[in-house]
């Protein structure tokens, strides 16, 4: 599992547990209201599902796995591989890349290399691969949209839970004050659940999915430019200098030292 996700959630929920324990003097049961959980969670989830096609909802649930278990993308490794491919193509010709085109783990890289081996026009290669990048970005938007919508509807559904509990509270205004206080506490817990859904559950997932998407698009852009440079027959040194432009100065210095 992604270490940042684990650390972030442990820190956030740990701080919440400590604050709730301190505020309630250890009576954490006051914050556990199954009825409010169902009301807030069910309303927010239902509204989110209603806001998008069902197939997109199913894909969004699968994107949660990508957020939690997705591997970090190391652009430096990608650049090294592209330079190595350029050296092979320069020395032995692009047909020598056929083995790489069959065995490369990244389907995007395989397609790009195969198009290059087949002698496809550079403009056509760029058009095909850029369409693939844009289609991938669109799929990622659907995954993020589900969690962003869940976060957006969370506070509103928390307010609905609060108002629902308040209506019940007003029916007992002439009764025992302790009963009124308990009903008000339930109303506030509903608002709390809505805020938690937005800020500590769905919101972080949506933000991380958006960041993962940008990282993957960035990595594929590096591959695309490398393939076009190889197809143009550029010197491996030129290919390396071109792709190094995607890195920060610090990353470039680190790669130079490693070399």
Image (cartoon, rainbow, N blue to C red):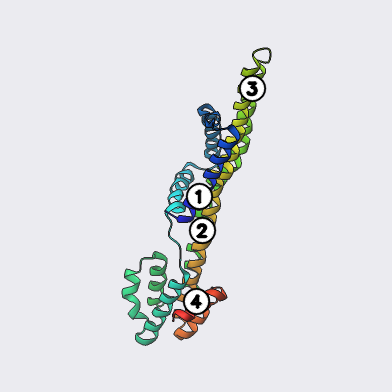
Instruction: Work out whether residue 234 can be spotted.
Output: no
Give the distance between the C-alpha atoms of the residues marked 1 and 2, in whole angstroms: 10 Å
Q: Secondary structure at mark 2?
A: helix
Q: Is residue 105 above or below residue 141?
A: below
As rendered, which of 44 and 223 lies closer to the eye?
A: 44
Measure the alpha-carbon separation of dots 1 and 3.
41 Å
Q: Could you tell which of marks 1 and 3 lies nearer the N-terminus?
A: 1
- Between discs 3 and 4, the one toward the N terminus: 3
Q: Which residue is mark 4?
A: 254
First reached walking from the N terminus: tag 1 or tag 2: 1
CA distance separating discs 2 and 3:
47 Å
Q: Name the element at disc 3.
A: helix
- Judging depth in this view, the residue of 202 and 127 nearest the camera is 202
Kindly report which numbered mark, 1 or 3, lies closer to the viewer in this rendering.
3
Q: Is residue 236 above or below residue 66?
A: below
- Judging by the rendered image, the residue that carries numbered circle 2 is 213
Q: Which residue is mark 3?
A: 181
Residue denoted by label 1:
143
Q: Position of residue 149 (x, y in %)?
A: 57, 43
The answer to which of marks 4 and 1 sits earlier in the sequence is 1
Q: Residue at x 39, y 83 (%)?
A: 87
- The quadrant of the image that shows the C terminus is bottom left
Q: Which labelled disc corresponds to residue 26?
A: none
Q: In the image, residue 248 lies at what x, y percent?
A: 56, 73
Within 10 Å of disc 1 (Cα), the crowding (few <14, some 14-19, many 20+) is: many
């Amino acid at each position: 599992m992604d270490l940042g996700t684990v650390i972030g959630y442990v820190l956030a929920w740990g701080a919440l547990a400590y604050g709730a324990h301190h505020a309630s003097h250890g009576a954490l049961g006051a914050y556990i209201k199954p009825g409010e959980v169902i009301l807030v969670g069910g309303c927010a989830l239902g509204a989110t599902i209603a806001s998008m096609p069902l197939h997109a909802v199913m894909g969004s649930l699968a994107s949660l796995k990508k957020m939690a278990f997705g591997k970090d993308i190391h652009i430096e490794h990608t650049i090294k591989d592209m330079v190595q491919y350029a050296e092979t193509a320069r020395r032995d010709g692009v047909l020598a890349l056929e083995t790489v085109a069959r065995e490369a783990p990244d389907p995007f890289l395989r397609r790009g290399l195969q198009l290059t081996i087949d002698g496809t026009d550079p403009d056509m290669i760029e058009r095909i691969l850029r369409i693939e990048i844009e289609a991938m970005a669109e799929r990622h938007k659907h995954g993020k949209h589900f969690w962003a919508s869940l976060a957006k509807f969370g506070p509103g559904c928390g307010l609905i839970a609060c108002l629902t509990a308040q209506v019940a509270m007003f029916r007992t205004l002439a009764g025992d004050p302790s009963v009124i206080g308990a009903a008000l506490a339930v109303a506030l817990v509903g608002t709390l659940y809505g805020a938690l859904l937005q800020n500590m559950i769905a919101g972080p997932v949506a933000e991380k999915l958006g960041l993962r998407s940008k990282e993957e698009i960035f990595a594929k852009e590096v591959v695309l430019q490398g393939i076009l440079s190889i197809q143009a027959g550029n010197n491996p040194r030129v290919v390396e200098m071109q792709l190094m432009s995607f890195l920060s100065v610090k990353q470039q210095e680190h790669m130079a030292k490693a070399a």
